Image: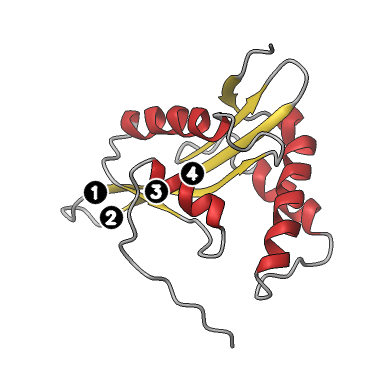
């Protein structure tokens, strides 16, 4: 059995992470007609993801074995005006796990690493961006203790 390792993402991971992201987005697009992939979407995502690698207010962790990358999690910090509580809020932007690894603990391991990073940053509350139509994503975050607080609305202009 191969050992699962969680570590900060590296630029050398980006080709595999981009593939995972693109695969997940294509699947999500099949269940949500509001979502469309733009021209050259993987290249644009990889470029944006690269800017996350060394940003001090962003976390980007990858799960891998010796053989392959199994998933990643991305998050950022949202600071409030001085004196406003909670002061800093964690925002989980994306959690992607290889479709063949779902249910194997990869998501939990990624979130455990992110939780540690959040605590080190003084975060006590987290917002999670989980698509409403992603039953797997919704179930995962609820199993971690998340609860719906705000219903986001979608408006097409």
In this rendering, position of residue 64 left or right of residue 55: right
Whether tag 2 and tag 1 are in contact, CB under 8 A, the answer is: yes
Spatial CA distance of label 3 from label 2 is 26 Å
Spatial CA distance of label 1 from label 4 is 17 Å
Q: Nearer the viewer, mark 1 or mark 4?
A: 4
Secondary structure under badge 4?
Answer: strand
Residue bearing mark 1 = 87
- Determine crowd level at label 2: few under 14, some 14-19, many 20+ residues with C-alpha closer than 10 A: few
Which mark is on residue 80? 2
Secondary structure under badge 1?
Answer: loop
Q: Nearer the viewer, mark 3 or mark 2?
A: 3
At 51% from the left and 78% from the top, the residue drawn is 154
Q: Residue furthest right?
A: 40
The disc, 3 or 1, on the residue closer to the chain's N-terminal end is 1
At 53% from the left and 61% from the top, the residue drawn is 131
In this rendering, position of residue 122 left or right of residue 105: left
Spatial CA distance of label 3 from label 1 is 24 Å
Secondary structure under badge 3?
Answer: helix
At 33% from the left and 67% from the top, the residue drawn is 150
Residue 71's place in the image compared with 89, above or below, is above
The disc, 2 or 1, on the residue closer to the chain's N-terminal end is 2
């Amino acid at each position: 059995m191969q050992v699962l390792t969680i570590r900060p993402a590296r630029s050398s991971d980006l080709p595999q992470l981009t593939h995972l992201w693109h695969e997940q987005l294509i699947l999500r697009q099949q269940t949500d007609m509001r979502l469309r992939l733009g021209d050259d979407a993987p290249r644009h995502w990889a470029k944006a993801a690269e800017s996350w690698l060394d940003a001090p207010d962003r976390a980007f962790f990858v799960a891998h074995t010796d053989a392959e990358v199994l998933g990643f999690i991305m998050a950022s910090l949202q600071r409030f005006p001085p004196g406003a509580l909670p002061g800093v809020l964690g925002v989980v932007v994306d959690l992607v796990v290889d479709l063949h690894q779902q249910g194997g603990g990869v998501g939990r391991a990624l979130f455990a690493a992110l939780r540690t990073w959040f605590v080190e940053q003084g975060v006590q509350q987290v917002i999670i961006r989980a698509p409403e139509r992603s039953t797997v994503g919704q179930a995962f975050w609820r199993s971690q203790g998340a609860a719906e607080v705000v219903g986001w609305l979608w408006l097409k202009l």
